[in-house]
Amino acid sequence: MSGIRIFLYIVFMIICVALTFIVLAQEGKSAGLGAISGMADTYWGKNKGRSMEGKLQKFTIALCVLFMVIALVLNIKAF
């Protein structure tokens, strides 16, 4: 195995573990009974992208993209 392939495997494993922990740390998407009466559209709901939950969601998307790209690269037989 080449050094690049070993490095990609190590990064891939780190991303897998990180994705597992980040997905488990996120809250569920159900708004509960507040969505029925319109309470889900509060200041907190509008500015969710700036909160810790919003940052976790953006980081999850970035890690998922890296996961897919590295998985595709590792399946290429050129290495």
Image (spheres, helix red, strand yellow):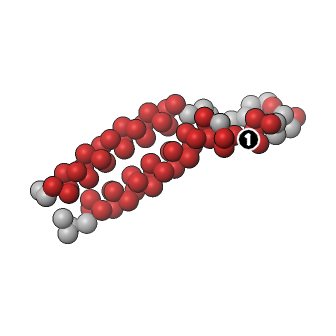
- Name the residue furthest front: 50
Q: In the rendered image, is residue 34 in sight?
A: yes
Residue 63 spot, x, y in % from top left: 44, 48
Identify the residue position indicated by label 1 in the image.
47
Q: Is residue 48 left or right of residue 2?
A: right
- Name the residue furthest right: 37
Taking the spot 60% from the left edge, 34% from the top edge, the residue there is: 52
Residue 17: name its quadrant. top left
- Name the residue furthest left: 1
Residue 42 spot, x, y in % from top left: 82, 36
Taking the spot 12% from the left edge, 56% from the top edge, the residue there is: 1
Q: Is residue 14 left or right of residue 59?
A: left
Q: Is residue 48 left or right of residue 60?
A: right
**Mark 1 residue crowding within 10 angstroms, few (<14) / some (14–19) / many (20+):** few
Nearest the eye: 41 or 54: 54
- The vertical placement of 35 against 58, above or below, is above
Amino acid tagged 1: Asn
Residue 27: name its quadrant. top right
Of helix, strand and loop, which one carries label 1?
loop
Taking the spot 66% from the left edge, 43% from the top edge, the residue there is: 49
**Quadrant of the frame with the C terminus:** bottom left
Taking the spot 77% from the left edge, 42% from the top edge, the residue there is: 46
Q: Is residue 7 left or right of residue 31?
A: left
Q: In the rendered image, is residue 35 in sight?
A: no
Residue 43 spot, x, y in % from top left: 80, 36
